[in-house]
Image (cartoon, rainbow, N blue to C red):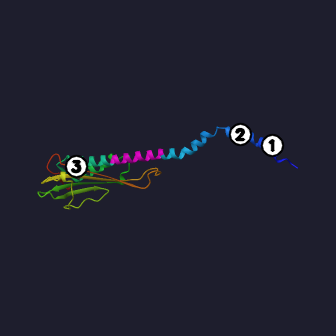
Amino acid sequence: MINLSVFFSALRELLGRPIGRLAGDERGVSAVEFALLLPLMMTLYLGAVELSQGIGADRKVTLTSRTICDLVSQVASINNADMTNSLNAASSVIAPYPVSNLKVTVSSIKIDATGKATIAWSDTLNGTARAVNSTVTLPAALVVANSYLIWSEVQYTYKPVVGYVVSGTLTLKDQIYMRPRLSDSVARVNS
């Protein structure tokens, strides 16, 4: 007959040394910590990259809106070639982002003696021009009787490159109003 207390004592002695050594071994702790933190670190990194690219694209949309409005408001009249050149300048401003995702609309707004604002003319790049004589609503501070405004609207469809943290497509928009500089209005000449 086997004495159980002696058996368990011998078993503890045999297993105790390797398990004791294993419990005191700390060589793999760094690898385990790294494996646990890696998903969090990658999410933070990719999120920062996507966020900075999105902010950069939004900034480019604002710059494009202001540039187009500024170009058009600096002339007394604008013909087809000048309008095409002004709208095509948007591709230089929005770079390095693709111009195919960009919609630019520039319009002249006429405000009559009663304060009613209507579209005098409108042109677009990759979008839909506003209908001539259609009524628009302006911020109250901009409604000055018998005056004109140049209105630039820009819309950009932004899709994150990685799409890990920010997924889907974002529509970035901006608009600006400017008064014509060289004359009361900017005439649109079809030549």
Judging from the image, what secondary structure is the residue with disc 1 in? helix
- Amino acid type of disc 3? Val
Q: Residue at x 81, y 45 (%)?
A: 5
Judging from the image, what secondary structure is the residue with disc 3 in? helix
In magenta segment, residue 86: no
Task: Say few, some or many: other residues with alpha carbon within 10 Å of mark 3 (under 14 / 14 to 19 / 20 or more).
Answer: many
> What secondary structure prevails in the magenta region?
helix
Range drawn in magenta? 44-60
Judging from the image, what secondary structure is the residue with disc 2 in? helix
Of discs 1 and 3, which sits in the foreground? 1
Horizontal side, residue 115 vs residue 44: left or right:
left
Q: Earlier in the sequence, mark 3 or mark 2?
A: 2
Mark 1–mark 2 CB contact (< 8 Å):
no
Mark drawn on residue 20: 2
Q: CA distance from mark 1 to mark 3?
A: 94 Å
Residue under label 1, please give it. 10
The image position of residue 78, as x and y in percent, is 20, 51
Residue under label 3, please give it. 72
- Viewer-closest of 71 and 49: 49
